[in-house]
Structures are given as structure tokens and as C-alpha cells.
Amino acid sequence: MKAKIVTLPGDGIGPDVVAEGVRVLRVVAEKSNHHFEFEEHLIGGCAIDATGNPLSDETLAACRASDAVLLGAVGGPKWDVGDVRPEQGLLKLRKGLGLFANLRPVKPHPALVHASPLRPEKLAGVDVMVVRELTGGLYFGKPQGRTNENGHARAVDTMEYSDTEISRIVDLACRLAMARQKRVTSVDKANVLASSKLWREVATQTAHAHPQIKLDHVLVDTCAMRLVSAPSSFDVIVTENMFGDILTDEAAVLVGSMGLLPSASLGTGTLGVYEPIHGSAPDIAGKGIANPIGTILSTAMLLRHSLNLPREADAVEQAVDRVLTDGCRTADIAQKGERVLSTREMSDQIIAQIVR
């Protein structure tokens, strides 16, 4: 097949890991006789420096015209002040592409249980898919902003959701659960928030269309506790934007490093944005020590969800599994005395497994 992939390396270690993701995709294309065309654009802080805009209209148009987008990371202390922020580029990208769902799989690797702060027995059987609503809630609600009144600063954010926004994300979670354990946990704060009360009502109604799915409701604070006390009790978690933002980072701790986890942001079509869940880590940018696995596993999700190449996606995931089983480690997951691989060396090992 032929596919156009836009790369948005972004800031910090983003260029380091995206380069490895592209290497993997090129090898997959060559091995399976596909043709992938890559087109690089700016996003985040580097885009602000170059154009004054964290995501230009031209870049957004290029993303819309592509089959998939591979994203690195945005942000850093350099851009922490001022009204124009790198993260605004991410919000514009999600909104502009209609990407309402973020999928984050969390499954600890048996060879890396030492890297998790949880005891090994707590990690047994953990295989969670977190489905986060991506274009509603506090990050997009209006009014939003800061004012000065009578010498005092005042800020307001608005959490709002419509029944349509809730039903489509819960429906997606139910459909994903059908291929798993058929259990969906909807997370809200219905004992306090009006938006969460609506969320719970609509989630219940939506689940009725999926009679094989067992739906339960959990308050967000309870969910946060269960993620560390009984993570294996979850199958698919679905929740609103801010709750999902927080809970997915908490869930990432289970596997031992944020450098290991991929994500996919999807809409109604096949176009998606794929990125590791970690941040830009500017302190290690360009040093060749970042873990590329989160990005490489994101390319597997890209192959599966946007390009409909499940066999190739499986090959990438199996290659990652094998190198971890064989003891390949970057600095973030290595134990004392273990050989530490560079970003490029880890990718080389994964690519070698794919070629085999």
C-alpha cells in the first residue's frame, strides 16, 4: 500500500524518538513491500520560535491531507511564560482533526516488573486500555480565562459536555471492550459535578446498546486508588478529558517508565495522531539516551488503526517484546549492572527482530 505520514517531532527528545519511529516504519514498509512517504512539520515550542504559532494552519492542513501523524513531544521551560504556549498546538491539532478519543494501553512487561513501584503480585494480570475523551471538558469549555477585578486576580475554566460527546466516546470504549474482557469502567465525579451526572446518565444509556458489556461506574478518586491497589480489576476505562489526562499518567507508573507507553488519538475516520505518552524531557534531549519504545509502539498503533496493517503492527509489538525479554535496556529501565543501550542501539535491536 501507499501512505503519507506527517511527522511532528516537536521539542526536547521528540526529534530523537520520532527519528527512530520513522526508521522502524521504513523497515516495515521495505519488508512488506509498502511505500510510506514522510513529510516533516513543526509543532510546539520550535514552531513558536520559527513562526510565532505553535501549530500553523499550513501544518494542520498537511496533517489533514495525510493518512497518519507521528508526533514526538512538545513543551519545555523555555516556553513556560507568555500567552502563546506549545500545548496550544496540541489542542488545536486534536480539535482541527476531530480527534475525540485517546487510547492508552497499559500492560506491564514480565521482564520489567522490577521497574514498577508496585509489588510484582500487584502487577499480575494487568492489561488496561484507558479511553480518554479528548476534545471536551475543562480544556475547551467556555468561558475560560483570567481577569483582574478590584485589584484581585480571578481565573475561570468551564467543564462542559454534551450528550453526543459522551455517547460517542463510551460507544467506542464498549466496542474496544468487545475484543477484550467485555468490561467497561466509566469514571466520573457524579457526586459533585453536573457534567459528571450527565456523563453517568448517558454512559448508562449508551451501554444498553452493547448488552454483552458489563458497565460499572467509579468516582475518579476511587479509580485513582484502585489503579495502585488493584489495577488488574480494570479492563477498559473510559473518562472525560482532565480525569483521563491525570489517570493515564498514573497508570503509566505501573509499567515502570513513561518511555515505554504508546498512545493513539482517533476520530470518526482512519486518520489518527500517534505519540508516546512521555513529555519533552529537555534535560536529556540530543544525548541519545531517551527510550524509543513508546514511539515505536506508537508506530504499531499507527499501522493497526490508520493503515489497517494488523500483521505489520503485530510484528513491531512482538519485536519490542522479544528485545525486552532478551534483556535490552535503556537507562530508564536498567537495573544496576545491566548494560545500557542508547536510543539508536535499542532501535537497532528492535529493527533486527523485525527483519528476522
Image (cartoon, grey):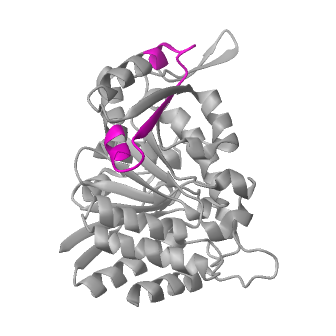
The image shows residue 195 at horizontal and vertical percentages of 45, 18
Instruction: Look at the picture and state if 66 lies above or below 198.
Output: below
For the record, the magenta segment spans: 174-197
**In magenta segment, residue 298:** no
Residue at the extreme top: 150
The image shows residue 122 at horizontal and vertical percentages of 69, 51
The image shows residue 53 at horizontal and vertical percentages of 43, 50
Q: Residue at x 52, y 81 (%)?
A: 347
Residue at the extreme left: 1
Instruction: Look at the picture and state if 41 lies above or below 182.
Output: below
Q: Looking at this view, is 165 or 315 the one in front? A: 315
Question: Which quadrant, please, contains the N terminus?
Answer: bottom left
Q: Residue at x 26, y 83 (%)?
A: 32
The image shows residue 114 at horizontal and vertical percentages of 74, 65
Q: How many marks?
A: 0
Q: Is residue 306 visible?
A: yes
Instruction: Look at the picture and state if 190 lies above or below 337.
Output: above
Q: Looking at this view, is 39 or 319 the one in front? A: 319
- In the drawing, does residue 87 fall left or right of residue 32? right
Q: Is residue 77 visible?
A: no
Residue at the extreme front: 212
Question: Which quadrant, please, contains the C terminus?
Answer: bottom left
Instruction: Look at the picture and state if 233 lies above or below 287.
Output: above
**In magenta segment, residue 187:** yes
